[in-house]
Image: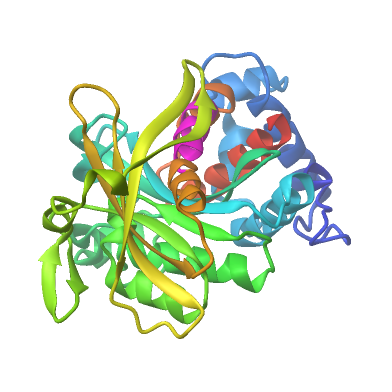
């Protein structure tokens, strides 16, 4: 349906006003699903029978279609295929290593893809994990301050005029707003420390009555009684009986099993909601700790919080698979629009595989 310009969200097929564009999009999606190892414009063009990459490049750059509208269709496709009221919405980011300085948003910045500071673009993603599988719902390109402070550079890369500095947490909030407004069925939100350390994002989720489990760093401060304390200090006072071994998922090497503990912390969320500090401890000799802030209905169990925290691993596997299978990172576009076009169509192909 999406490849023909029609979908659950768009039955009239008006995303692509020209039949040539619809045909080109369909061919591009098929090319991303093909067997070639790298899905750059030359190899995708060869896969779909083109003599050169110019048609693919035109589709990503100058042709007339709105990647935001197609993003809405992608979201509807994911819900239709994988929808489940118990699903988890996952916030995370991934890096796209680049050479040069012209690609929109490229900068020397930390990326988990390399595990260090590299010249890269960083995309913030919202994924959907249910018992049926994991797929991507939404995406935004993060623009560092050095880009926002250079209007000429932004103009050359096609960044919309007037674009202001937006944090990763604000990008995440925008994607969640769109998902909630579209009625995406899900029961929890999770994400790593980038999003857990964003107090505005946490308070907004609480105000919307959207349960969450978000990772935080050991030096995160929380209120306990009338005093503030670092989460690591609070964990140090937990008795042995506070820890419970819970299997949160099954991986390629067997069960993912950890010791978990939780501690209610100050709340002003009404009589039916609670806020917790959640802690995960590895069962190996190092006993490494990970910390989370959570909020949700008082009846929530420790096991539910633990499994929600563990759901975040599925997006890491999603990034790896999407890069390997549908060329998520193999694009050769420099513009802001071109990035959003490829990083919309690649997840369509990935959802089909899922």
Could you tell me if residue 328 is visible in this image? no
How many numbered callouts?
0
Residue 54 pos. (x, y %): 58, 33
Seen at 38% across and 46% down, the residue is 93
Identified at 60% across, 60% down, the residue is 187
Q: Which residues are magenta?
A: 312-321
Asked whether 55 or 180 is in front, the reply is: 180
Q: Residue at x 58, y 68 (%)?
A: 178
* Image height of 81 relative to 318, above or below: below
> Which residue occupies the foreground of this view, 112 or 255?
255
In terms of depth relative to the viewer, which is nearer, 295 or 39? 295
Left-right relation of 41 to 212: right
**Image x and y of residue 125, in percent:** 47, 50
Residue lying at the far front in this picture: please name it.
Answer: 241
Image coordinates for residue 254, horizontal then vertical, percent: 49, 18
Residue 314 is a magenta residue: yes
How does the figure colour the protein chain or chains? rainbow
- Name the side, left or right, on which 56 lies relative to 153: right
Q: Is residue 262 left or right of residue 247?
A: left
Residue 1 sits above or below residue 28 on the image: below
Nearer-the-camera pick, 354 or 216:
216
Q: At 52% across and 34% down in the image, what residue appears? A: 318
Asked if the magenta segment contains residue 331, the reply would be no
- The quadrant in which the C terminus is found is top right
Q: Main secondary structure of the magenta part?
A: helix
The reply to whether residue 285 is in sight is yes
Rendering coords of residue 110 (x, y %)? 21, 42
């Amino acid at each position: 349906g999406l490849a023909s310009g029609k979908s659950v969200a768009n039955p009239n097929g008006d995303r692509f006003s020209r039949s040539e564009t619809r045909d080109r999009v369909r061919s591009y999606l098929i090319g991303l699903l093909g067997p070639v190892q790298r899905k750059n414009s030359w190899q995708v063009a060869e896969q779909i029978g083109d003599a050169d990459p110019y048609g693919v490049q035109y589709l990503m750059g100058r042709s007339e279609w709105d990647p935001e509208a197609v993003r809405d269709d992608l979201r509807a496709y994911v819900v239709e295929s994988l929808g489940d009221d118990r699903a988890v919405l996952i916030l995370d980011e991934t890096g796209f290593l680049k050479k040069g300085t012209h690609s929109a948003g490229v900068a020397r910045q930390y990326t988990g893809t390399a595990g260090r500071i590299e010249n890269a673009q960083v995309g913030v993603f919202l994924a959907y994990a249910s018992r049926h599988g994991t797929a991507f719902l939404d995406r935004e390109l993060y623009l560092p301050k050095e880009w926002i402070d250079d209007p000429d550079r932004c103009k050359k890369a096609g960044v919309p005029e007037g674009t202001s500095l937006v944090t990763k947490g604000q990008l995440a909030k925008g994607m969640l707003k769109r998902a909630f407004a579209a009625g995406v069925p899900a029961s929890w939100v999770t994400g790593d420390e980038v999003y857990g350390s964003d107090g505005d994002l946490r308070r907004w989720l609480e105000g919307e009555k959207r349960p969450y489990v978000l990772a935080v760093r050991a030096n995160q401060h929380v209120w306990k009684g009338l005093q503030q304390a670092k989460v690591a200090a609070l964990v140090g006072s937990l008795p042995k009986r506070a820890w419970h071994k819970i299997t949160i998922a099954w991986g390629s090497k067997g069960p993912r099993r950890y010791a978990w503990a939780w501690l209610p912390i100050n709340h002003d969320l009404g009589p039916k909601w609670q806020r917790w500090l959640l802690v995960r401890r590895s069962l190996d000799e190092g006993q490494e700790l990970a910390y989370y802030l959570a909020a949700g209905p008082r009846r929530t169990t420790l096991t539910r919080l633990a499994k929600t925290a563990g759901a975040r691993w599925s997006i890491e596997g999603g990034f790896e698979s999407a890069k390997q299978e549908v060329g998520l990172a193999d694009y050769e576009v420099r513009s802001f629009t071109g990035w959003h076009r490829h990083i919309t169509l690649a997840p369509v192909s990935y959802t089909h595989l899922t």
